[in-house]
Amino acid sequence: MRHALAQNVGVLRRMFASKLAGILNILVIGIALSLPAGMYVLLQNAQGLVAQLSGTPQISLFMSMDAKADDIDKLRRQLEQHPAIARVEFVSRAQALEQLKQSTGLADVIGGLNQNPLPDAFIVYPKPGAAQALDELRIELAKLPRVELAQLDSAWAYKLEALLKFGRMLVLILAILLSLALIAITFNTIRLQILTRRDEIEVAKLIGATNGFIRRPFLYFGATQGLLGGIMAWLIITISLLLLNHQLNALAQLYASQFALHPLSPGDSLTLLLFSMYLGWLGAWLSVARHLSQIEPR
Amino acid sequence: MIRFNQVHKRYPGGYQALKNVSFEIAAGEMVFLTGHSGAGKSTLLKLIAAIERPNLGSVLVNHQNVGVLKSRALPFLRRNLGIIFQDHKLLFDRNVFDNVLLPLQICGFDYRESHKRARAALDKVGLLKREKSNPIALSGGEQQRLCIARAIVNRPSILLADEPTGNLDAEYAQEIMAIFKSFHQVGVTLLISTHDESVLQNTDVRVLALRQGELQPALPFPTSGESAQA
């Protein structure tokens, strides 16, 4: 085993002898992989944001400013008995102001107000249904007495969700195309390797090497190159995110809030590395299967 | 050990390299194969190693018909043969020692055993001091001896040599012949092709003479006592 390892290390060293070409290859693979993987990271971040903001669809009912306590009680009973509504939550004007102070960076602005500009509000959680039914419910609720405004909060979230789906499809297409590119790069590199090592392959066949023996170093080479390309892609993404986060931080501070892009999770990182390694191996395998049989000793 | 039955070999394009060749070589024999260039010597050796296949007839090596061997089985046939090539086929991307190591790596010998054997083979051909050199730095005679070391390192029972003294001067040629004789003495079967009839002077070995692809019935060398015909 130690011998086999030493031998393969020797073979790989000879194969990586052309350093510049090897580094360029790894760079190309890294960049090709970092595009879909980087977009995937951005999407993951956007998706996290959407989940935080939207959750389930809800309708906000804003009361008119002159609504009295018994108007509110009456409305609450009405809403609770409505067949299309699952749950109702009341947010008083004072509560709303407090929340506003805490959740955004506008505390200073609000502190300067001499009266609470916010109305009392109900947050209505409808039973799950079609988007159209939600809109109909919104119109119905808007007509209730003392209701100033009924707003379907999730409408924009649906739009964002559709946009995210579009983005995910884009990432998928990009990932497939660039994976094919990676396979093609490896295929070609291995083809060149096979051509330059033609003599060695011929001699090895003449002195009794099995096809497996001849194939093995090329497969290792393909997998190693793929893995190094994956590591390169990981570095590109991680460093880019660090740079972006640095700028985002400055931006977020202007709004007195905190926001940062999350890097690739350990699981996703591992997937990226294994996937690139596998693609390298696959490209090498295809190339070897195609080209090795053409070299027969004469 | 090696047996040809009415073997015909015609190359694509119509060139008839061997015509109706039959002979047998017993285990432990040392046989010379002579003839002018183009007489079919190399083709005959290639048929034994299944580098080429006969169009007609059968080639038996160790009772195995190598003409019909599946390509998966070829490596295991060739591991049993030591082949010394006319053009050496040395690898110039590694040193002398690694060239000799290659057959052992292919056969899966462990580190210690393979290094021991490679040293022994290099010692046998007198190249132990050059083990770190690149083969390109060796003289023609040394390259030939390196090729021999690589052929014998996994101790094959049959040794095939294609023009081993082809481009060497007489002194080197004698050295190489002496090495072959020492293998013959330890029971290796040898088939050595040569167009240089001078190396056969003063030797008492069997000769197979090829002329235009056909085996000659009579011996052209008066110094040799045995018949070439099997």
Image (tube, rainbow, N blue to C red):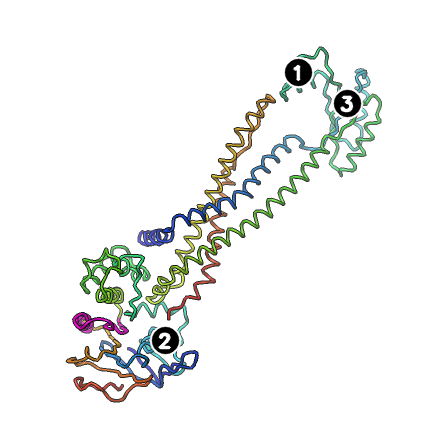
Residue B28, image x, y percentages: 22, 76
Give amino acid for label 2.
Val
Q: Is residue B219 left or right of residue A28?
A: left
Total tally of numbered discs in the picture: 3
Tell me the chain of label 1. A
Image-based side of A280 in relation to B98, left or right:
right
Establish whether labels 2 and 1 are both on one chain.
Answer: no
Distance from disc 3 to disc 2, alpha carbons, whole Å, reads 93 Å
- The amino acid on which the numbered mark 3 sits, given as a three-letter code, is Phe
- Amino acid type, mark 1: Val
Can you identify the residue that label 2 sits on?
A: B66
In the displayed structure, A8 sits above or below A85; it is below
Q: Give the residue at mark 1.
A: A109
User: Are discs 1 and 3 less than 8 Å apart at CB?
Assistant: no
Chain ID at mark 2: B
Circle 3 chain: A
For label 1, count other residues whose C-alpha is less than 10 Å away and answer few (under 14), some (14-19) or many (20+): few
